[in-house]
Image: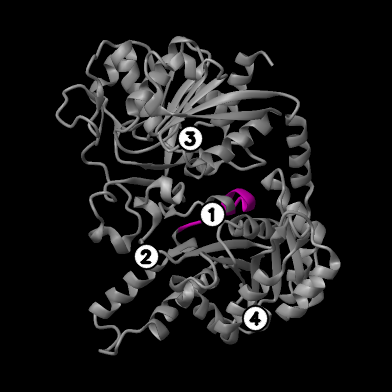
Amino acid sequence: MKTKFIFVTGGVLSSLGKGLAVASLGALLKARGLSVTVQKFDPYLNIDPGTLNPLEHGEVFVTDDGAEADLDLGHYERYLDVPLSQLNTITSGRIYYRVLNKERRGEYGGHTIQVIPHITDEIKRTLLKIGESENAPDVALVEIGGTVGDIEGLPFLEAIRQLRSELGRQNCLNIHLSYVPYIQAAGEYKTKPTQHSTKALLSIGIQPDIILCRCEMPLPADLKRKIALFCNVDQDAVFTSVDVKNVYEVPLKFYEEGLDLKVAMLLTLPARSAKLEGWRKLMADFEESTKRKITIGIVGKYVELKEAYKSLHEALVHAGVANLTSLDLKYVNSEEVTKKSAAGLLKDCDGILVPDGFGYRGVEGKIEAIRYARENKVPFFGLSLGMQCAVIEFARNVAGLDHANSAEFTPENDQNVIYMMEGIEYRQKAKEFQNQMSDKSDEFRLGAYPCVIAADTLAAAAYQEEEVSERHRHSYEFNNAFRAQLEEKGLVISGTSPDGNLVEIVELKDHPWFLGCQFAPQYKSRPMKAHPLLKDFIAAALKKSGK
């Protein structure tokens, strides 16, 4: 097999930044001229995170082929700038689902179904598909979600233990990310948590090749030697993952420590130097961006957990850097926005953005925020539901449709300017689940679809292309029955599906910058290649600020 595998596990506690560590190492290996991909294995029993509450799990990331994935896939795509797919995101639920379906079809010949070998074999089959594809990458990084010691993660750990012996040490590498706490009262770091975490891995039969220590400051050499001694790794195989002000600095920090060099040596990868000019320029641009700042109001209903808008947050940061501007992202709970309170909550915003979401809670607040942006000429950007709310607001307050709404919220209303269009061939998540989808998961328009851009519009100025591809995650669409009426009142339709049937982008002409799109542009933004629409939105907000 051409592909070499790097398995990354986490210990001591969660939220150590395994996803960022994996993405950063992948970026370094790609900078060495290798083709790289990443897989994420999540131990939870949901088929995917598509139906999970964002306040519990964070955002759902969407790939070109319609996979609803953990937010870590967003990190992978942003750092590696490679499109991922259904193959790159796997949950325990999906693994068990496949095994049980095979058992029902009699594929196991009447044998008792067990975790070993049936579940672990299915995990290994899924892993190896990456290396068996026609365009198999040189390296596949595989992040095992959760923490060593979690019961639900044991089948995945057993599967990678088996693969190590089946593929050989020269084709598999185990990296363990652990926490090394600094005890302020004692004035020293403590290595015992890392020792116990590694011991837990060893009890499963996995010997780490590299220990990556999450800590506040770089560890002294004697402490690294101690960890190497007690965790049975080479002295030059203990690295630190220190706190940084900017997450895009992590690849450069890993490079300074020599992490990519050690990985290349252990896997006998080509001895090339990493080309990091782009990352260094990015950090220089970040530094330049600190010289001016503008405020962007984000009006949503999941603002209690910023991870619910992770890709959007990062995409706005990219757009700010592209304009050499830092952003103060002001999250505003849409349930608190009313016609009376809008001015007080949003008056200091140089731009207002209403993100995607589901359900009626907070929608009226979003509509009032959009009204404030339209009437006060504040640059506005609406994403998915944000665009739909912009259409509703325009219909109510400009076109005279007093009861305008969405069929998602008022099914019997005869002024639903947003509705679920019949006859559309919606893309389902994965063929294997098409007939078993719940009501909350079917009829979604998921994944990448083409969009034709109208000339002489804000969208055309941003994209500089006649047709683009963008990712979707929604059920409801612009209702064409009201299209002519709204256009007559000044609504500009600047992006549609190639057949002209589905409205993808709307704008206003008599406004500095007012645009809504049915898709989610944040999924395709990259740190060194900001999304065109977000870049122009920030440019308009910067112009308004006078800075």
Residue 450: in magenta span? no
Q: Residues within 10 Å of mark 4 (few under 14, many from 20)?
A: some
Which label number is shown at residue 487? none
For the point 77% across and 79% down, the residue is: 229
As helix, strand or loop, the secondary structure at mark 4 comes to: loop
As helix, strand or loop, the secondary structure at mark 1 comes to: helix
User: Closer to the observer: label 2 or label 3?
Assistant: 2
Compare marks 2 and 4 and give the one earlier in the sequence: 2
User: Closer to the observer: label 1 or label 4?
Assistant: 4
Q: Where are the magenta residues, as a range? A: 76-85
Residue 422 drawn above or below residue 517? below
Compare marks 3 and 1 and give the one earlier in the sequence: 1
Disc 3 marks which residue? 467
Q: Residues within 10 Å of mark 3 (few under 14, many from 20)?
A: some
Compare marks 2 and 1 and give the one earlier in the sequence: 2
Disc 1 marks which residue? 72
Q: Quadrant of residue 431?
A: bottom left
Query: In the image, what residue type sits under mark 2?
Result: Leu
Q: How far from the left and from the top, in percent, is residue 87?
A: 46, 63
As helix, strand or loop, the secondary structure at mark 3 comes to: strand
Query: In the image, what residue type sits under mark 1?
Result: Asp
Disc 4 marks which residue? 207
Q: Residue furthest left?
A: 412
Q: Residues within 10 Å of mark 1 (few under 14, many from 20)?
A: many
User: Mark 4 and mark 3: span between their CA atoms?
Assistant: 50 Å
Compare marks 1 and 4 and give the one earlier in the sequence: 1
For the point 33% across and 49% down, the residue is: 427
Q: Is residue 432 left or right of residue 200?
A: left
Q: How far from the left and from the top, in percent, is residue 340?
A: 39, 13
For the point 29% across and 90% down, the residue is: 111
Circle 2/circle 4 CB separation < 8 Å: no
Disc 2 marks which residue? 45
